[in-house]
Image (cartoon, rainbow, N blue to C red):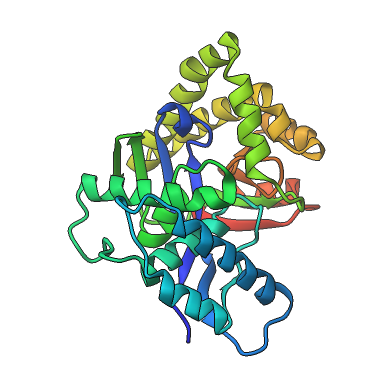
Amino acid sequence: MKGPLFYAKILLFGEYGIIKDSKGLAIPFNSYKGALKTAQNLSGEALKSNESLKRFCDYLNNLDTQLASFDLESFNKDIDAGMYFDSSIPQGYGIGSSGALVASVYEKYANNKITVLENLTRDKLLKLKEIFSLMESFFHGKSSGLDPLNSYLSLPILINSKENIEATGIPSQKEGKGAVFLLDSEQIGETEPMVTLFMNKMKNEGFRKMLSEEFVTYTDACIDDFLKGNVKSLFKNVKSLSKVVLTNFKPMIPNAFHKVWENGLKTNDYYLKLCGSGGGGYILGFTEDYEKAQKSLENYKLELVYRF
């Protein structure tokens, strides 16, 4: 038995800001994926996954059934038969490992599920996001539901505000020099402590002011530029956003990368930003010249996401 594939996601813009109603743009990342599988003799990661699914099934048993209900009898039976989530998506890297798992469980076990094939009205998207938010909270404490939504639909998602999300198209990739890439920090990041840190910072009036006047302004501008293909303006705004993040979100940036981050801003070879909640995992990079960025970052592992 093998379920359908669900892909990783990258939140290009909007990390933390979407908690405070800024725009966000998430895209599927097909280099990493996962699927539900069953095996007779489980060991290692597969066994760990199977035990985690057991706990997840218990958690779903206590969920608000008005919003969604699941065929938990079948889910339990499959878990007992050796089901696990077989995934190449690195955990703690900010690219949606738990989101893909949630999407696969919803797809297989939800009763009266909203399918990808039907006309996805805004109301249906919001309902899906709400269901996924509740489901994924099992893994993170608090979830926006965006990662599983992106994985489930396998489409770019534009978040205009909490109450306004839509599937969107992004400009097709070109064979240009510019690129979006992932920089591997080679550290695991944990979402929950980072979000707690952010919530504590939000108690500070100066931080809130910076968020609404600078962070959200540049984030929204980056999304508009990206979707319209205004590459020149995009890099100007990404540089401003990168500066704001370095100044105000330092605890979310692994210490070893503070200098690397500054170097990009100084040389203009590349600009870095958080990928997800930070604290480790991947860091997202933007460059007008990918070869130059590769030379500058030759001691690090890079992965290409998108070409301009």
The residue under the point 61% across, 27% down is 198
Determine the residue located farthest toward the bottom in the rendered image.
40
Q: Picture coordinates of residue 120 (x, y %)? A: 22, 54
Image side of residue 205 versus residue 70, left or right: right
Q: Is residue 125 visible?
A: yes
The residue under the point 74% across, 33% down is 263
The residue under the point 39% across, 72% down is 108
* Picture quadrant where residue 221 is located: top left
Q: Picture coordinates of residue 293 (x, y %)? A: 67, 47
The residue under the point 58% across, 52% down is 139
Q: Picture coordinates of residue 308 (x, y %)? A: 46, 50
Residue 150 vs 57, above or below: the answer is above
Q: Picture coordinates of residue 155 (x, y %)? A: 36, 57
Q: Decide which of 102, 54 is in the foreground and name it.
A: 54
Residue 132 vs 197, above or below: the answer is below
Image side of residue 284 versus residue 250, left or right: left
* Picture quadrant where residue 231 is located: top left
Q: Decide which of 303, 81 is in the foreground and name it.
A: 81
* Picture quadrant where residue 165 is located: top left
